[in-house]
Image (cartoon, rainbow, N blue to C red):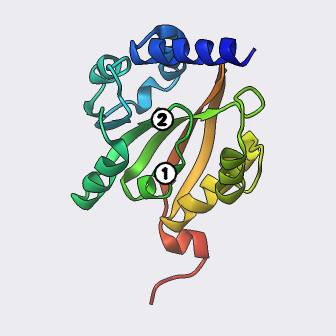
Amino acid sequence: MTGHSAEKHKKARLLQKQNADKYHHPREKKKQLRKFKHFLTGEILEVFAGKGNLTKYYTKYGRVTPMTIDSFNTIYKLRGHKKKYNVIDIDSYGYPDKFFPVIFEMMTKECLLIFTFPVVGVNCLNGITEQHFINFWRSARPTIGDVTGILTDMALREWYLLQLLDVQKIKRIWRFVYICNRKKATEFCGVKNR
């Protein structure tokens, strides 16, 4: 049984590398994005753009920065250059954690945040991944509410109000869409600067 499972996993990885739609879900992602076309303007950051499934789609609406290689290091270079984006799409095979909270420093005043996240009950967890979820998301099996709660706390550090607009289950992943609006600190705190 183990040999069959390992062989199946190898085949899946190969198809992922070949950009098979079965694993990248461009149709489902575009269908979801159509609901939010009015937000798809200006500067668009596409993290893990891969072979450009969504890059062509995004190009119709704004100027795209497609990060295809070494996204974890490149994101810090972009932040160092004080780049700001109207749309940030993190399609990191379901594990966007390393990009938080830094991406909240890279948003324009109103920013659409999109990312994939594993459907935990479907994807096989090992002990290391489970502990990572506990450390980062405060739960071994993070729910939509857990993810939104943690991100809300992170967003508030940069004075962003986070609102979940949509979440779609696409086979083994969740695809989250949030709108992030930057507010004045005085609005959050209820105090006035003197």
Secondary structure state at the residue bearing disc 2: loop
Q: Disc 2 marks which amino acid?
A: Ser
Percent coordinates x, y for residue 141 in the rendering: 77, 43
Distance between mark 1 and mark 2 Cα atoms: 10 Å
Q: Residue at x 66, y 23 (%)?
A: 172
Near-viewer residue (122 or 5): 5
Say if residue 28 shows up in the picture. Answer: no
Say if residue 20 shows up in the picture. Answer: yes
Q: Residue at x 39, y 12 (%)?
A: 18
Q: Name above or below for residue 110 compared with residue 20.
A: below
Percent coordinates x, y for residue 106 in the rendering: 36, 54
Cβ atoms under marks 1 and 2 closer than 8 Å? yes
Residue 19 appears left or right of 138 = left
Q: Residue at x 29, y 36 (%)?
A: 69
Residue 52 appears left or right of 187 = left
Near-viewer residue (185 or 103): 103
Tally of numbered tags: 2
Q: Disc 1 marks which amino acid?
A: Lys
Query: Considering only order in the chain, which callout, 2 or 1, is on the residue closer to the N terminus?
Result: 2
